Image: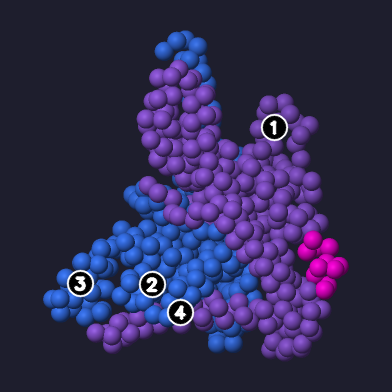
Chain colours: A purple, B blue
Amino acid sequence: MRRPRVVGSFLFLSPAVVLYFGFVFFPVAMTFYNSVHTLKADFGFETQFVGLANFAEILGEDVIFRRAVVNTLVWGVAAALLEIPLGLALALCLYFRVPLHRAFRALWFTPVLMSYPVVGIIWLWYFNYDWGAINSVLRLVGLGSLVQSWLSNPVTALPSLILVTTWMWAGFNMVVLLAALHAIPQEYIDGARVDGASVRQVVLNVLVPLARPTIVNLMILSFIGKMKQFALVWVMTRGGPLWATETVATYVVKRAFHWRTFDLGYPSAIAVIWFVIVLGLSLLLTRALQRRELIQY
Amino acid sequence: MSPGRRIVSGVILIVLLGYTVWAVWPYVWTAMMSLRTTEEILRDYYGLPIPAHWDKFTEAWTRFGFGNYLRNSILVTLGSIVIVTSVGSMAAYAFGRPRYVFRGRELLFGLIFISIMFPPQIMLLALFQLLAKYGLINTRLGLILAYAGAELPFTIYLLRAFFAQIPAEIEDAARVDGCGEWVVFSRIMIPIAWPALTTTIILNFILFWNEFAYAVVLITEQKARTLPLAVMFLQGETFVDVGMLATGMMISTIPVIVLYMFLSEWFVKGMTMGAVKG
């Protein structure tokens, strides 16, 4: 009776173990190894041990890294504070069954279906100085003085990209929040209504407090998701102008493949630092939540 | 309804219609441009596609290589889905059933689970190095293995929860009838788990189809590009052919839109399940 079980676990687990250790665990370990070396990509990855020199340089004097960290954190916090309240407002409208609510839900979800390059290019057009939709609308409503080249101004570049991710993810958060609102027992709402509560009071005192776990959960997920932001920046600004939109993820790739040093060691050290920070934040924030179950339908 | 409330609901509806335009206008605009020549677009960016140049899709397909890019995207996406779903469901089954408990199983699962939170950069450069060493850079196989590895932890995590809740009686009854380990899994468990499998397949489909960060590092040759890469490089050319770019963007988006029209609830379910991903 014991043998088939052993054979069974081996049979079922070995493909996953091979794939996991070959393409996840081993690359991670290799990155740690590389982070204390210099690797010349153009000389067949010739390695040279440098100890903690990469880490000292990144944490001590790399101003671009510091800028990238700040940009990424700003993006994460702003996204959490924009996407989720917007998604909640939309979800509440649909919860009270405005006309067309089914169509609205299906349509608002669609922006997350597009790939980042497609989204990025559309928004490059939106932000175009001469004929982009943003400037055209501003000129149309008589705010011509606000017209500018949004992505080449260091002050407006990052907010512009944050606007794009907000456009993309608000509908997604709306769908999750709507599911959370529908999971609230109808008696609570009916009870409050019988006691004479207005729609506004029901929203603020019943629906929002009861949906709070989901709201907090989504904020954390949105924040952590932005810690990995790469594609949109790569397509739209490449981190420019003047590092104004550089994220840690784009800086790693830039240092590895678009820097004249052709060194894989230094960017690996950045990746290790970021790995520790992101993993630490993820564990800390999910622990603070104390619940990690699936969203229930 | 009082006149005052009617006005309020009217205003809300107008705002929501405005938001809908904001959300879907990019699709509509790109779709219109994909049927117009660059010359027509430069004359009027927001014009209607009259007459519609359907032949631009043929041109993108042949002259701009989108037939090849589409094939790359389809093969990479399907290959990764087949691997991650089969390998992942087998592992999830062994992790989820009490029958297969062994010393260190929970530790192994914990290690895989925590990998869900890894930022991709921690693997990306080493993967480049590894694939280069084994001649898998610029190959569909290399990309498939990298994708399957990257999504394996989350796929196992989702499916394990499902396998764990299947009652033991079903399994026991089959064993009494003399079914072996593999038969119980493939003939009994997989059909029961099919709804969960569909959800992970859809989630992984959208992730692989739109994937960019791995592809931009692991693919450096034009012929191996997937659609997201092809779109980016078309934008990067010195003279940007706006009309052709829009056609390429539509080619890369249409498959997803068509599937979403038929399976929208599955998409919503699969992708929001992905929301627990840290």
Same-chain status of marks 2 and 3: yes
Q: Amino acid at mark 3?
A: Asp
- Tag 4 residue: B104
Image coordinates of residue B32 in percent, x first then y, are 50, 44
Residue under the point 34% across and 77% down: B100
Q: What's the chain of the residue with tag 2?
A: B
Image coordinates of residue B93 in percent, x first then y, are 34, 71
Residue under the point 50% across and 11% down: B4
Q: What's the chain of the residue with tag 1?
A: A
* Disc 1, SS: helix
Relative depth, front residue between B246 and B278? B278
**Does any portion of residue B256 appear in the rendered image?**
no
Task: Check the image and report above or below for A157 versus B198.
Answer: above
Same-chain status of marks 3 and 4: yes
Magenta-tinted stretch: A56-66
Relative depth, front residue between B28 and B18? B18
Instruction: Residue A38: name its quadrant.
Output: bottom right
Same-chain status of marks 2 and 4: yes
- Tag 1 residue: A138
Residue under the point 38% across and 35% down: A185
- Tag 3 residue: B172
**Does any portion of residue A143 appear in the rendered image?**
yes
- Tag 2 residue: B95
